[in-house]
Every structure is written in C-alpha cells, then in structure tokens.
Image (cartoon, rainbow, N blue to C red):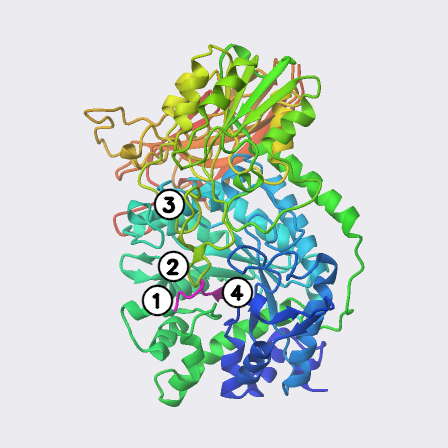
Amino acid sequence: MRPFENEELTIHERVVDLLSRLSTKEKVGQVNQHLYGWEVYRKTSTGDIELTEKFKEHVKWGGGIGALYGLFRADPWSNVTEENGIPLEDSRQVVSLVQRYIKEHTHLGIPALIVEECPHGHQALDSISYPTNIGRGAMFNPELIEKMSRKMSEELSAKGVHLALVSTLDLVRDPRWGRTEECFGEDPYLAAEYTRRVVRGFQGDLIKTGEDFTKKTTKQLEKSDSRIGVVLKHLIAQGDALGGHNSGDVSIGERELFDIYDPIMKSTVNAVGVMAAYNDIDGIPCHANADLLTKQLRDTLNFQGIVMADGGAIDRLQNAMQDKSLNAKQALEAGVNLSLWDHSYLAIEEGIENQSIEMETLDRSVYKVLSIKFLLGLFDKTKESIEIDWDVSKKDWQQTNLEAAKETLTLLKNDHNILPLQKPKTIAVIGPNANSLYNQLGDYTSPQAGEYATTIFEGIRNRFKSSKIVYTKGCAVRSSEIEIEQIRKACENSEVIILALGGSSARNFGTDFLANGAVNTPEENMDSGENIDVSDLSLGGNQLEILKIAHEYKKPIITIIIQGRPHSIERVVSLSDAVLIGWYPGQRGGEAIASLLAGDYSPSGKLNVSIPRSSGQLPVYYNQKRSGKKEDYFDMTGKPLYSFGEGLNYSKIKYSNLKVEKSRYSVQSLKAGEKIEMSLTISNHGEYDQKESVLCFIAKLNTPLLSRKKELKRIRKVTINKNQKITLEMELDYADLLQLDQHYKPKIFPCDIQIQIGSESSMIHLT
C-alpha cells in the first residue's frame, strides 16, 4: 500500500505523498477543469452511454482530470434534452463509468471531482427547480434555506456529484444587472447569514471553523453520504458594477468592502470552495487579485477550500496580457486553484518549462485540489451505487419546494382586503406570465416535465374549481403584439381580473450563446438573466396596455409580477387593487400563488430589495451612507416606491415592549464576544396563523465618520398563531457595532446606537 492510500494517515500526509509522485503534466491535469461535461459522453442507438474520444484524449493529455463540469447539465446552451441526456436513474452509473476509465488509464488513478450547477436546484434532467435566489431572499428564513440546501445535497449526492456551484455572494446594488435574480437581495447581513446556512445544508460540519481538516484522517471527519461540497459564487462585488453592466468595472474602496462585503466574505470560511468573480475591483481583476484571494481570504479569514475560476475568466486576463502562460501565472499566484473551461491553464507546463511559473506556485494549487478530493471521500472505498427510491425522495423534496414557493410571495398592496378572493363565479387570467412555465423558473433552468410543474393559470384552475376561468395571453413580455379583442372579452366575462405580468429569463433552444454559457443574442422576450442587462426597469412590451384596458372595466384587478429583478411598477400599483410580487417561484409557483389568492395561508414575504419608481433614481438600496446629500430630484422624489423590508399579510401583527438589557455601554466594557441582549413581544390579532419575518436594524448616530442610515443585523422567522402572543429574544454583539476609523482599522466609536425592530425602537449610548 502506498502512503496516499493509507486511511490511517492524515489528509496532509496523504496529499504530500501523492503530490510527490506526480509529474508536471499530471500536476497541470489536476488544476484543470477544461471540458464541458456533456461533451464527454454520447448515447448509442440502443440507449447506452459511452465515453467520447474527446474525453479520452483529455485524460491522456493531463494524466487524469482535476474536475469535470456539467456532466448532467441539460439546457439550451448544452443542447441536452430528454433524448440525448443522462436519465435520472442512470446518473451514478455514468459517474462510475467516467471514474473507472480515469482509474484504468492513468498510472495513479486519481478520481475527478464531479461538479454541477445548482443555481436554484440541479440543472439536470428530471431535477427539482426551486424558487430563484431573489425570491428566496424575500423569505427571510435562514432555517428554510438550510433545509432546501440539504434537500439539494441529497439529490446531488445520490447522483454521484461532489461539488455544487451555488450563487450566494452577489448583492443587488443595481437591479439593471441581469443576474439580479441570482442574488438574495441588497443586504450583506442577509446574504452572509444565508451563505452560512447554504454551507451547512450542503456540507454539514465537514469543515469546522478554526480546525485544519488536513490534520485529520478521513475517518475523523464528520461527513455523511448525503452531504457534498459547495462552491460559493462569486467573489466578490459583482453586483456593484457601474451602470448595472455584467462583468463591469467596480469602483469601490476599502471602506465599502468592509461595510458591505466583509460580512459576506467571512461567511465563506467553512465552504469547500469559492468561485472568483468576472469583475475587477478598482482596476484589479478578481482572478488576479492576490490581496483578495490570498491575503484576505486565506491568511486573514483562514479559508481552507479551493478557489475556482469562473468560466473562461482567466483567458479574459489577456485584455492586459496576451501570453496564456502569463495569464496562468497571474491567476495561480493570486490563488486560483482550479480552472473552468479556459485555455490559459492548459499552458501551465509551458510556463514551468520557460521558468515564468515556479513549480512551488503550481504545487500550492495542486495541494489544495487534492486535499478537497480526500476531504470529499474520493479516495475512500465506497459502493458503486447508492440505493434510493427516487419517487419517494422527489415527493419529499417537492414538499420543501412548495413550502419555499409560498414564503417567497410578497404582497405589496391589498386595497379593501380584496385578497383573499371570496369564491368569484368567473375569473379572467391574463398576461404573458400566466401560463408559461419557463417564465416563472428563472435563468439556468433544465427542461421541465412532470406532475409538479404548475403555471399560474393551471394553479388557479385547479384551486378555484367552482369558478369559470377565462385565460388569454394578451401579449408577450417584450414584443409589440397585443390581443386586444381577447383581452376585452376576458375582462367583460369576469368578476375578477388577475394579471400575470413582469419579465422572463426563459432561454430557448437555438439561442446564440457565448463560450461561458451566457446569452449572446437574447430572444425578443428574454429580458433578464446573465448578460441581459437593461437600461430601463419599466415593464416591457404592451403589458401596461393590458392593465389600462382591464382598468376600464372597473372590476377588481389583482396583478402578479413574475420577475428576476425589481421593475419600476408605480403605474401598475396605481391601477391595481392588489399587487403580489411572485419573483421566479419555481415549479410549484402556480400552486403556491393560487393557494395564497384563495386564502389557504397568509403571505409572509418581505422585500429583500427596494423597488424604484424609475431607473433614474438608482441607487435606491436602503443602507446608503448618511451623507447629508439632497435626497429628492428636481423632477422626482428620491424615495423608492417600496423600501427594503416592506410586505403585507392577511393577519394583524403588532410589535411591543422592546427591552434592551442595558441602556449604556462604554467602549472599555463592551468587548469582543459580549452580547447586547434584547427582548420584545409580538402578538397576532388577526384571523390567520402568521409566519413573520422579524428584522432587527441598527443605526449608528453621532459618529465622527459617515455611517449608514440603517443596517440589518439580525433576522428571525417565527410562527405566531392567531390570538397568540410570543416573547422573542435577540442579541447583538461587539462585531455588529464596528466601523473603520480614518486609518482603516475596525473600532467602536462613541456614538448613539438606535435599535429598530418592527415599529419598536430603543437607543443605546456608547460612551
């Protein structure tokens, strides 16, 4: 037995031994993730799966493979469908086929990491499609995020996947950005708390804070067969690009990084991996930013996992440098351990030979990749397959999916308590998003089929069985067509009008894509998603015209907005009796929306992103600095239409009796690790049991440096039954009060701290 095969040795000892046995070619192979996974297999005429020559040649080239991306990916970019893709029940057997070939055709037989996209569920055939991040942020429910992540991990691990790529680190700083739907919202605390829960849901306690996992044996790790590693993306500040342009310039300083992105970076420390972002920060590309990826992430925060490149991003360094081996040198030295589809890391051996890249630099990345392979059990003796009842498991996962879809829905207007609906005899359902499943699923979605996928129209038809439902599309999301006659007929013959408007990230087969999978030339009615940035946040096409026509009939109008970004909807609000933000609610979205309209439950979503009146107001995120600027414009108010944290329900929730343990603290007495304890009473005087998102904000007043108007510091999701009263306890600590001083050192200044929870507030004075 060779030392790296000895499970009694620590991971570090095994990696050092294995690394010493690798040739330069094999080391380069381990830091490469060059192939598109759907190119490594094909279906035969009998339906069997066989490996392609392209895959075999690449294995030969690198003496193995570091990681294989997208083996199961199915979507318009990969052009994988039910006909040519990998069936659910064959997933693990195909992984075994890949790993067996690598083992038998390389001299050390190092397994490949199987890496899959999981933006809102696994992007593969017959997989669960959950609400996108922008909707899940509106849940303000960390426990449910962890539960969903655990369900995704169960699904992926059963298929033989090792790493899930999950967006958690981006913020909505400019909603014109097409990838807004991948963000949990505009707030760093929310994103950081959700990120920690995503890591725990996928990985359990695989990597523990303060412990070096490489000093343990694989037997000493706390791991489960249903847990896999997660790679968090994107590091960092991608949503802060100027003008909302995808991959654009980010001009922020050290103070903004500390206030907004430091909490998010800290939340990554126990993850198996992070993915670097396409953007630069003050002129330095993230993939070449050693201060970000090594000094801050590794040295300061003690991050132990791998840093993965984003798709083709290292090749983009050629904007400043034309030699691919020098691109590789720049990225390796910055701390990028594993490539993704680029050609620059294919040139590493050339850089070693001409001495532009030092072997020690390459070894550092190889060490990281191999450590993660041992951590995730790739060298352990495991069964060829794991028994799973897919039907039973999918039923369980879909129950969580429905639970999440319900909690994302955010009610902003409900005049005269028109909702819930009181069994109308006839309902008109109109709009481009009323009966289009893919419009409610978001970008990066696999082909959908099965009993659980329900559109809004289908959900209403199934729930309101005693009502006559009249449906017409009315218009498309963006094109100029409009079905005026059909719209009028539907409105005339109904008691209630339900409009399903908004945007769409739905891709089509045959769309023109870039090499990294982003859309190059979007279809006319795809107005959101990666590389689909807009200058105007107004609803597209003739959607407002539908609303104007409906308004002429003076009947109750309920408008549902399906969207991946906040649109400017001031006109929509003024002409509608009720407005419900549905975000992209996933497969179960139609069912969840219909159930809410019927009053089966009370909505609990709250805005995780402020809604502007106009694109010209941007930015409108709530936690801007208290700069003393003039808020209003000459021609418009500076206030958003709806602010972060707003949301209605069917019940009557009251906050009262906020108590803070001490009213005065001194800088000397409040030390790291100490808590400020709070309690308050929340009562439900309505007719519904209510899930309530409790948001705790602070504002630092009278400080010598500019502070933010308000900062979210704690969130709790609680259930308060009708006629019930609960006492809720929360805590703040030392870190919540820190600011950077004039020398960019974190400290607590003497100031007043205003604490706000719901309608209640209290003041603490730091002397």
Considering only order in the chain, which callout, 2 or 3, is on the residue closer to the N terminus? 3
Residue carrying label 4: 304
Amino acid type assigned to the residue bearing label 1 in the image: Arg
Mark 1 to mark 2 CA distance (whole Å): 9 Å
**Closer to the observer: label 3 or label 2?**
3
Which SS does the magenta portion mostly show? loop
Mark 4 to mark 2 CA distance (whole Å): 22 Å
Mark 4 to mark 1 CA distance (whole Å): 26 Å
Considering only order in the chain, which callout, 1 or 4, is on the residue closer to the N terminus? 4
Residue 55 image point, x, y percent: 58, 76
Residue carrying label 1: 316
Q: Are marks 4 and 1 in contact (CB under 8 Å)?
A: no
Mark 1 to mark 3 CA distance (whole Å): 20 Å
Amino acid type assigned to the residue bearing label 2 in the image: Tyr
**Relative to the observer, which residue lies in front, 605 or 681?**
605
What is the secondary structure assignment of the residue under circle 4? loop
Considering only order in the chain, which callout, 2 or 4, is on the residue closer to the N terminus? 2
Amino acid type assigned to the residue bearing label 3 in the image: Trp
Residue 215 image point, x, y percent: 61, 71
Range shown magenta: 307-314
Considering only order in the chain, which callout, 2 or 1, is on the residue closer to the N terminus? 2
Q: Which mark is residue 278?
A: 2
Mark 3 to mark 2 CA distance (whole Å): 14 Å
